[in-house]
Image (tube, coloured by chain):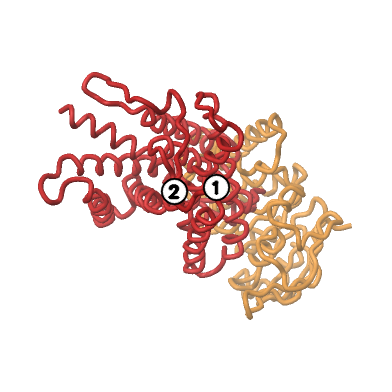
Chain colours: A orange, B red
Amino acid sequence: MSMLEVKDLRVAYGKIEAVKGISFTVGQGEVVCLIGTNGAGKTTTLRTISGLIRPSSGEIWFEGKRIDAVPAHEIVMLGLAHSPEGRRIFPRLTVEENLLLGAFARNDHGAIKDDLQAAYELFPILGERSKQPAGTFSGGEQQMLAMGRAMMSRPKLLMLDEPSMGLSPIMMQLIMSTVKTLRSQGTTILLVEQNARAALKLADKGYVLEVGHIVLDGTGDELLVSDEVRKAYLGED
Amino acid sequence: MDLFFQQLLNGLTLGSLYALIAVGYTVVYGIVQLINFAHGEVFMIGAFGALATWTMLFKGTTAIWVLPFMIVGAIAVSVTVAVVMERVAYRPLRNAPRLAPLITAIGISVFLQEAIRLFYPGAKSAMPFPQIEFVTGAAMEWGPLTVRRSALFTIGALIMCTAALWFFINRTKLGRGMLAVSQDKDTARLMGINVDRIVAVAFALGATLAGIAGVAQGLQNNNIDFFMGFLAGLKAFTAAVLGGIGNIMGAVVGGLVLGIVEAMAVQFIPGTFGGSPWKDVWAFALLIIVLVFRPQGILGAKTVDRA
């Protein structure tokens, strides 16, 4: 059984339909990526899964429970974390406060402390600057904070929206290798990326979105070599 | 010079009252970007809550031990009214154009005034507020200063409330949740924060301080009336804007500054423009000056902030 199952999902902003009936699955332990250009509906899809937007029709199932009508703050408690596009860290709070907010839904204080240490081990820079306001951080550091914060809820499934956006190549590599680390530690990952090559390289499975439809799917390796993907998303001839 | 210190004390007293009410405007604004113009009535209702508690349970008693019960009664009534108001009137309008909640606020304001006037026995005219030994009664002489006991109660209440508020915002999980919601609602939801609950907490928090302010006002003024929330609310709103709307400590600073400026203007502006008839003019003149030269307020910030 899949961990996450999206069935014929449609999402509209007013009269404009952004997601036009897509279906996909994410299995336990997989890294699945959604690729596509701006406006393809990737971010909308993630925001709908995490409960920030309500679908106009379709179903979303997470670990055997239907969640498309569950409030966003309860979805986190089920073990589904969302690191949103543009990082969206809380700029006027310190790094530590940001991380603790990631654990807002939890009450196991001892384990939260352990996870705080784990986040500082994953990203040492966060530990060094734990008392600084997060708004003073660079884009890459904010991305680390956003991922660390999402991990603080101990998610079974982590959704990352454009983690490499606006980052230097070195920072991007670091973020991608962190995704690998998290997967090896047992976290399932749903990744939305514009950098299709980097995403497909580490994905078990990929879906290509175009204006609200899934037009192609396959394993990461299959998509990397497919003609359509190479032409449209990898900039090759 | 004695006059100066006397007026400073009077200004601090008045300012403490403004500050206690102003926090309610600012904390709600910081969370939902709504100016709750019915907040003055929450303060008024708190005073009536204290009076009702005394009338029903302790009538005839003037001992100091009834004061905590009156404060609890005031807070209970204020918080209930504020939370119900949010749930019934403001929440359905959360995504409506901004004019809708504003007009609603004015409607609630009139509704609450009239409800008290018509249904609280005897409230058609001003009602005497119970005199409690130790916090009312003969003023004390501290050297050249005349210190009213109720003034010490008011200033003391502000100090304690400010300390408690600081602790709540900066040191508790719920306070951290409020900061998060004020900065980014959607992301706060992704953290597992129930935004509706935080909004209710913000209203309750402001109402708690307004209820305490209602008691302080009753003790100072010896009587209360259904219209007392109007000008006090307007002044407290001014104080909140003065300090930087959305900034909690700004509301405290703004309240104190406004109170002191009023007291000083009454005493030290000579001739036609001096004296108490002009104090409101100077208070609002101060608001205009601050808005022209420092529109973000004395402490600034547009969200609930700790600074």
Query: Where residue B278 sits: x, y (%)?
Result: 21, 51
Query: Where residue A116 sits: x, y (%)?
Result: 63, 35
Q: Which residue is mark 2?
A: B225
The image quadrant that residue A46 belongs to is bottom right
Q: Chain of mark 2?
A: B
Going 46% across and 28% down the picture, which residue do you hit? Answer: B132
Q: Chain of mark 1?
A: B
Quick check: marks 1 and 2 in contact, CB under 8 Å? no
Measured Cα–Cα span from mark 1 to mark 2? 26 Å
Q: Which residue is mark 1?
A: B202
Amino acid under disc 2: Asp
Query: Where residue B164 sits: x, y (%)?
Result: 50, 32
* Residue sitting farthest toward the bottom: A15
Q: Residues within 10 Å of mark 1 (few under 14, many from 20)?
A: many
Q: Quadrant of the N terminus of chain A?
A: bottom right
Query: Where residue A189 sits: x, y (%)?
Result: 73, 53
Amino acid under disc 1: Ala
* Residue sitting farthest toward the top: B143
Q: Is residue B301 visible?
A: no
Q: Quadrant of the C terminus of chain A?
A: bottom right
Give the number of the mark in front: 1 or 2.
2
Q: Residues within 10 Å of mark 2 (few under 14, many from 20)?
A: many
Q: Position of A6 compared to B219: left or right?
A: right
Secondary structure type for disc 1: helix
The image quadrant that residue B86 belongs to is bottom right
Secondary structure type for disc 2: loop
Going 35% across and 40% down the picture, which residue do you hit? Answer: B253
B262 vs A53, nearest the viewer: B262
